[in-house]
Amino acid sequence: MKAYLVLARPFTLIGPALGVVSGALTALGSRHYARGEFGWDEFWLVVLTAVAAAVLNVASNSVNQIYDLEIDRINKPERPLPKGSLSVRQAGWFTFVCYVFGVGASWLVVPDPAFTTWSERASAPLLAHECFFLFLLAAIMTLVYSVPVLGRTKRLTLGANLTISLPRGLMLKVAGWSVLAYVSHWEPWYIGLCFFLFLLGAASTKDFCDLDGDSRGGCQTLPLRFGVRKAAWIIAPFFVLPWLLIPLGVWWKPDGVEPLLSGTAELLLGLGFSLILWGGYTVYLILRDPDALSRVENHPSWKHMYLMMFWAQIGFALAYIVKF
């Protein structure tokens, strides 16, 4: 059980679960929330989806370690597969079960208040299951990232970052929103865009300390392709520029009446500017000694990337929930 727990990488599960909860609370306080109230029914919908997102991330972590076995023998020899604590077959069955549960559970998530029981939600019309299709697409992307026969985009510079930032950035936020409101309008996608652009660059922070294994595994990560220093300058803007979209969304009124972001303007502006300043500090840490990114296993910028993501998720939820 300890080996399976290590395979799951528990720390990485906080982000997906928090992202779903944040997305749901953001929808709850938006102008698009249509359920009227928030009771136990809505609470359990959010809990189920958050657990499903965490389990789906377990599946993603596991399948990645299966196909990264030779790389991990160099970069992460203490992990269960290279260490021999688990066999590839055991990890494969564990991955399969997690994918089935993670995606399957999302079928029960329907935001329409007309469907009040689990059985009614399960038999709801196909188009009502927006959350399921978002989870399914995210699951496919995680497989495309790791599995050679599906393309293994991990070996491609831009392809790797796209297949990380789309499911974990854009789609995670929209999936959380789809728990309590439909996604057929711009607001959830615009919010998800902030997280997508952030991860598109910031996700590369994990690649700087894995140069040896990634090189032998044929993965052309950003620092391998462009060198450590140039790669550091490439990812730096992604810690700051995406958060400019938050004040822009507060001030921009596409219909001439309502701002694109319907949360509390003051809180959203505070969130946006705090992330811009935080991102600027992280850029300073990266650029003052770019070579340190490849010398230290967990560079401070990696920690700040996760903390910024957590703060952004919490900040959006707070900015919207006060309007409910």
Image (cartoon, rainbow, N blue to C red):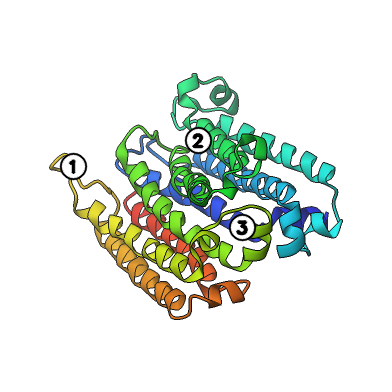
In this picture, is 39 found above or below 228?
Answer: above
| 235 vs 17: above or below | below
Sort mark 2 into few (<14), some (14-19) or many (20+) by Cα contacts within 10 Å.
some
The residue that mark 1 highlights is 254
Sequence-wise, the earlier of marks 1 and 2 is 2
Q: Is mark 3 on a helix, strand or loop?
A: helix
Mark 3 and mark 2 residues within 8 Å of each other at the beta carbon: no
* Type of the residue with mark 2: Leu
**Local secondary structure at mark 2:** helix
Query: Residue 195: horizontal and vertical position, in percent?
Result: 42, 53
**Mark 3–mark 1 distance (CA, rounded to whole Å):** 36 Å
Q: In which quarter of the image is residue 6?
A: bottom right
Tell me the CA gap for discs 3 and 2: 20 Å
Q: How crowded is mark 3: few (under 14 residues within 10 Å), some or many (20 or more)?
A: some
Residue 129 x/y as whole percent: 50, 27
In the foreground, 128 or 189: 189
Q: Which of marks 3 and 1 is nearer the N terminus?
A: 3
Q: In this view, does 33 lie to the left or right of 258?
A: right
| Marks 3 and 2, the one that precedes in the sequence | 3
**Residue appearing at x 85%, y 51% in the figure:** 86
Residue found farthest to the bottom: 288
Report the disc number at residue 12: 3
Check disc 2 and report the residue beneath it. 134
Residue type at the position of mark 3: Thr
Q: Kindly identify the amino acid type of the residue bearing the numbered disc 1.
A: Pro
User: How many marks are shown on the rendered structure?
Assistant: 3
- Residue at the spot 54% in from the left edge and 77% down from the top edge: 292
- Assign a secondary structure to mark 1: loop
Q: Distance between the residues labelled 1 and 2?
A: 26 Å
